[in-house]
Amino acid sequence: MFVNPTYLRPDHKDADLFASARNIISGNVSSDWINKENKAIFPSRRLIKDIRANFFLKWLNNNFPEMKIVLLVRHPCAVIDSWLRSGFGDGSVSRRRLIDNVDFVSDIEEGLIKEYLKADTDIERLAFLWAFNYFVPFQQFSFGEIKVVFYESLVLSPENEIREIYSFISDDFQDRGFSKQVFSPSSTTSKDQSFFEKGVRLDGWRKDLSMDDIKKIDKVMGLFGFGSLYSFEDGMPNPGELRKLINP
């Protein structure tokens, strides 16, 4: 039902999409893939990971307000590098689907749409896709309605970040040795990833992306006001910028 990317206005009405989302959130969808990480016989809570929901997060929030939403942000160069290496595509299909969405084109500043249409390289199209993936929820949510977590901060200070996540989603956090679990890679972690090794470099994308690629990505980020959200020198985020980017 949710073809990637699916853009929905926060007040969008669609009984079929609502039913599909409700089935997923209620745990009424089951498969070996979905259940492979579930080790609990009688689970009391549900964690849903979705890497393709950014364009309708506020719609989900409006329809299921009891559900806490954590938005993970990672350096655009790292994400684009990963997309290119995994065969994600050159961004042209995603652009066509977004541009064909009348609501999306109507809700986004005309200048950004024009620049998006002019993007003629895979790097630029994917940079726009990354930017829109965060521009939309940043515009639709008010500060504090969702928990924004930077991937890089999670890597460098996992215990602090996870405590903050727990404080956002629950008021009964207990440290039950979660540190050990944090450093156990999931089944979806690539074998060549060194996330769990000490001294991991967070700017590994530099070996794959040219300086011209990085400059193109940086230019696109500037169009959205994201120029200071991440450093293109050391690859680290600037959390203080969120106050400027998310609706007050």
Image: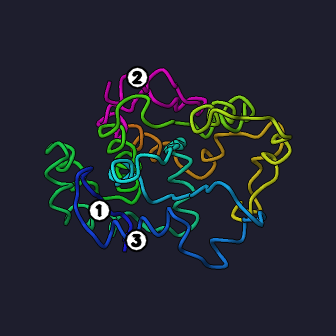
Q: Main secondary structure of the magenta part?
A: loop
Residue type beneath disc 2: Arg
Q: Which span is picked out in magenta? A: 219-248
Q: Percent position (x, y) of residue 59?
A: 32, 52
Q: Is residue 234 left or right of residue 179?
A: left
Closer to the N terminus: mark 1 or mark 3?
Answer: 3
In the picture, the disc for residue 20 is 3
In the picture, the disc for residue 243 is 2
**Residue depicted at 36% across the width and 29% down the height:** 245
Closer to the N terminus: mark 2 or mark 3?
Answer: 3
Q: Secondary structure at mark 3?
A: helix
Quarter that holds the N terminus:
bottom left
**Residue depicted at 72% across the width and 31% down the height:** 157
Residue type beneath disc 1: Arg
Query: Given this view, does label 1 or label 2 mark the residue nearer the observer?
Result: 2
Q: In the rendered image, which quarter is residue 233 located in?
A: top right
- In the image, 198 versus 181, the foreground residue is 181
Q: Residues within 10 Å of mark 3 (few under 14, many from 20)?
A: some
- In the image, 179 versus 199, the foreground residue is 179
**Residue depicted at 61% across the width and 57% down the height:** 46
Closer to the N terminus: mark 1 or mark 2?
Answer: 1
Q: Percent position (x, y) of residue 108?
A: 20, 46
Q: In the rendered image, which quarter is residue 218 located in?
A: top left
Residue type beneath disc 3: Ser
Q: Is residue 178 left or right of residue 166?
A: right
Whether residue 2 is situated above or below residue 159 in the rendered picture:
below
Magenta-colored stretch includes residue 244: yes
**Residue depicted at 66% across the width and 32% down the height:** 161
Q: Secondary structure at mark 2?
A: helix
For the residues labelled 2 and 3, the Cα–Cα distance comes to 33 Å
Q: Which residue is mark 1?
A: 95
Query: Given this view, does label 1 or label 3 mark the residue nearer the observer?
Result: 3
